Amino acid sequence: MKKIVVAIDGYSACGKSSTAKQVASILGYTYIDSGAMYRAVTLYFEQNHISLTNESEIAKALENIDITFLVNAKSGLNETYLNGLNVEEEIRKMYISNKVSQVSSIKAVRDAMVAQQRKLGKKKGVVMDGRDIGTVVFKDAELKVFMVADIYIRGARRQAEYLEKKQLVDLEEILENLKTRDHLDTTREESPLKQAEDAVVVDTTFRTLEEQVEEVINLALSKIIDT
């Protein structure tokens, strides 16, 4: 059976990552969290006080950034490593969420991450989620999915994620963050968030995670059979 590339794009907190992880697991594919890569870069910039307007500082910093994914033996989930250190928990915190859209809009950052993402997906058999996977990273992906959901539902989901990690964040703060990220993601000059012409729209507002996963799996299987 031939392998394909599954590209899942969409807005924050629509269920992209949760869906992509399960789809990859069911298909036996590799899951690549492109958002985690940009979050890791953001963390590095924060820790090393990199100016987002200093091109030479950014270029030098990117040369020193190595991002890898390793599977946690207990949970079976991919975790993000920055220069050999597990940063999975740190990159999910609110202060990173507040900065990641700014960092990911920088051309040099996007060029570096897209190059890594294409390398990871060269052999196919991957599920990757993000903002520009179907429009930039893998324009020829066999399956492209674009996820949307009501912003209040998205906010409630994100708040629940924080609570699971024992982080108490006000819903209004989360909604403002989502609105800001939506604006930055869709209006940035470099690789803006937009639906690919051949993408299938999946509205997750009133769908459970299981229903989302089932729909994408069915779409993927139809592409695999046709490939």
Image (tube, helix red, strand yellow):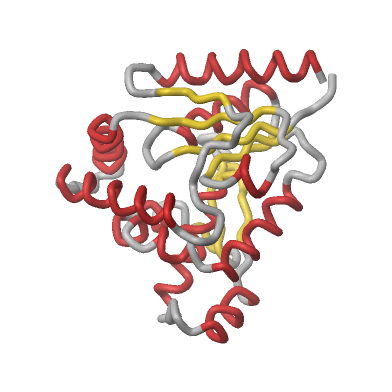
Quadrant placement of the C terminus: top right
Work out whether 205 lies above or below 63: above
Name the quadrant of the N terminus. Answer: top right
- Residue 56 position, x and y percent, is 57, 86
Residue at x 56%, y 24% (from the top left corner): 200
Who's the residue at 62% across and 76% down the image? Answer: 64
**In terms of depth relative to the viewer, which is nearer, 73 or 59?**
59
Q: Is residue 57 above or below residue 206?
A: below
Check the image and report above or below for 39 versus 224: below
Query: Number of labelled discs?
Result: 0
Q: At 78% across and 13% down in the image, what residue appears? A: 225
> Which residue is nearer to you in this view: 96 or 72?
96
Horizontal arrangement in the rendering, residue 175 relative to residue 61 (left or right): left
Q: Residue at horizontal 73%, vertical 49%?
A: 120
In front of the other: 167 or 158: 158
| Image position of 17 (left or right of 177) | right
Task: Measuring from the top left, give residue 67's x and y in whole percent.
Answer: 61, 60
Decide which of 142, 27 is in the foreground and name it: 142
